[in-house]
Amino acid sequence: MCNLFRLLLLLILIAAPTATYADSGQSTRVTDANQHVYQSAGRYPYREKSDYVLKELDLKPGDVVVDIGAGDGWWAEQMVKFVGTEGVIHASEVEQKKVDEMKEKCADMPQIKPYLSPTDSTGLSENSCDLAFLSKTYHHLNEGGHVDYLRHLRKVIKPTGRVCVIERHPSLAAGRGKEHAWSPGLLTQQAEKAGWILVRYELMTGTYHYVAIFVQKDLFPAEPPRRRPAAGRNRSMK
């Protein structure tokens, strides 16, 4: 009887749909009405997806990152594990108090370099970084200055580098949360105007936040001209 019960339990577990949904690589079909329900009780639900985000970033030893609006340095601490002893995380903030707090917190991680930055740029030299990372920072950029800031990043980021933005989706925000959100459509428009191309966008399940990753438009060669069909050739298209 005991063995029969175990067999039935095993069959139920196999047949039942999983209650968790991984990001990236999964079907977009909604198999559960509650699939996208907000699942976090913390202030930073997107941090609970750090494994997924870091996998998408694919950081390598020696990479140089600028963490724009680094806050308490949490993301910088996670990135250190991937960039190694030769890598650098420039942790920028616009308030000296936050810079000082990060310096104290990250004193045993010399790869993390907290610094005070201007509000309209990173203050870093050209072609100095492999990645610009903005977690809940983009909506704080100077009003009307988003495109110019992204243009500045094109100079700071190496030709093959990337920009990663994490923001709350405004359509899924309520109350004051709408003030701390940004439309992914508007972000993409602004990025394209500044010369960036979206290569990855995904809503992080259960967080109401999304991650968007861009690369420079210059990486895409011009599409070769199409040959004209020969006279009399069937021009129908499928």
Image: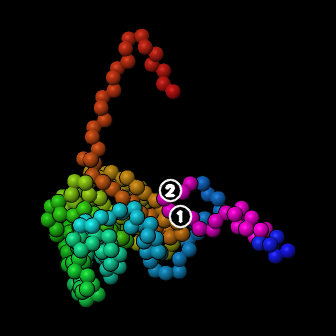
Residue 17 is a magenta residue: yes
* Secondary element at image label 1: loop
Residue 158 visible in the current orientation: yes
User: Where does label 2 land, which residue?
Assistant: 25
In the rendered image, residue 177, in percent from the top left (x then y), is placed at 46, 74
Q: Give the range drawn in magenta.
A: 7-27
Q: Residue 108 lies in what quarter of the image?
A: bottom left
Callout 1, which amino acid? Ala
Q: How crowded is mark 2: few (under 14 residues within 10 Å), some or many (20 or more)?
A: few
Q: Do the residues labelled 2 and 1 touch (CB within 8 Å)?
A: yes
Is residue 92 on the magenta stretch?
no
Look at 29% across and 58% down and name the residue there: 162
Image coordinates of residue 208 in percent, x first then y, are: 50, 68
**Secondary structure state at the residue bearing disc 2:** loop
Q: Where is residue 89 in the image (x, y as percent from the top left)?
A: 25, 73
Quarter containing the N terminus: bottom right
Q: How crowded is mark 1: few (under 14 residues within 10 Å), some or many (20 or more)?
A: few
Question: Which residue lies most toward the left here?
Answer: 125
Determine the residue positioned at 69% across, 63% down. 14
Q: Distance between the residues labelled 2 and 1?
A: 8 Å
Query: Circle 1 sits on which residue?
Result: 22
